[in-house]
C-alpha cells in the first residue's frame, strides 16, 4: 500500500509534503505532485504536512477520486523526483477549495 495525491493538489501544488518525505517518493508535474507507490514507505509524514488535505492512504481514497491511485502510479514513472520545497503555484489560493479538478491535470513534467 502507499499514499496517493488526489484532486486537491491540482492547480495548487503546495510542496510542504516533499520536505518531510524521508524517501523522496514525490514526483513533480506541471500543476500537481504524485507519489510513487513503489518508493512510498507508508510513513504518513506527508499527510499532516499537506495544507489542502490532498493525500490519502490508498485504501482511503474517496471513491470519486479512485482514478488518482492509478494516475499517481503512472505519472510517477514519467515525472522527475522533487526533493525540495518550492513555492506553490501562483493560482493556488484561488484553486484551494475548488472540487472536481481531475480534468485540469496536466500530464506535462514539472521542474
Image: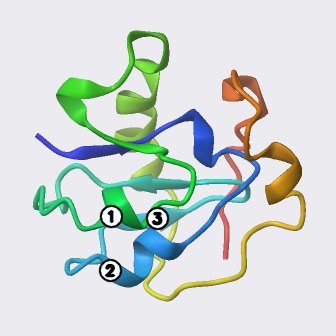
Q: Position of residue 10 (x, y in %)?
A: 68, 44
Residue at the top extreme, as displayed: 63
> Residue at position x 47%, y 20% from top?
65
Q: Is residue 100 left or right of residue 78?
A: right
Residue 76, numbered label: none
Observer-nearest residue: 4 or 60?
60
Q: Quadrant of the C terminus?
A: bottom right
> Residue at position x 73%, y 38% from top?
97
Q: Earlier in the sequence, mark 2 or mark 3?
A: 2
Q: Is residue 99 above or below residue 96?
A: above
Binning the other alpha carbons within 10 Å of mark 3 as few (below 14), some (14 to 19) or many (20 upward) gives many
Q: Is residue 87 left or right of residue 68?
A: right
Q: Position of residue 89 (x, y in %)?
A: 80, 66
Residue 81 seen in the current view: no
For disc 1, the marked residue is 46
Q: Earlier in the sequence, mark 2 or mark 1?
A: 2
Q: Earlier in the sequence, mark 3 or mark 1?
A: 3
Identify the element where label 2 is drawn.
helix
Observer-nearest residue: 68 or 55?
55
Image marks 2 and 1: residues in contact by CB distance under 8 Å: yes
Disc 2 to disc 1, C-alpha distance: 6 Å
Disc 3 to disc 1, C-alpha distance: 13 Å
Residue 20, numbered label: 2
For disc 3, the marked residue is 27
Amino acid at each position: 500500500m502507499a499514499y496517493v495525491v488526489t484532486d486537491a493538489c491540482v492547480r495548487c501544488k503546495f510542496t510542504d509534503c516533499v520536505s518531510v518525505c524521508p524517501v523522496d517518493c514525490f514526483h513533480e508535474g506541471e500543476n500537481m505532485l504524485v507519489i510513487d507507490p513503489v518508493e512510498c514507505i507508508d510513513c504518513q509524514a506527508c499527510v499532516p504536512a499537506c495544507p489542502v488535505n490532498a493525500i490519502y492512504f490508498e485504501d482511503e481514497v474517496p471513491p470519486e477520486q479512485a482514478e488518482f491511485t492509478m494516475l499517481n502510479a503512472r505519472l510517477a514513472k514519467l515525472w522527475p523526483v522533487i526533493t525540495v520545497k518550492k513555492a506553490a503555484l501562483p493560482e493556488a489560493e484561488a484553486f484551494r477549495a475548488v472540487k472536481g479538478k481531475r480534468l485540469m491535470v496536466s500530464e506535462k513534467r514539472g521542474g
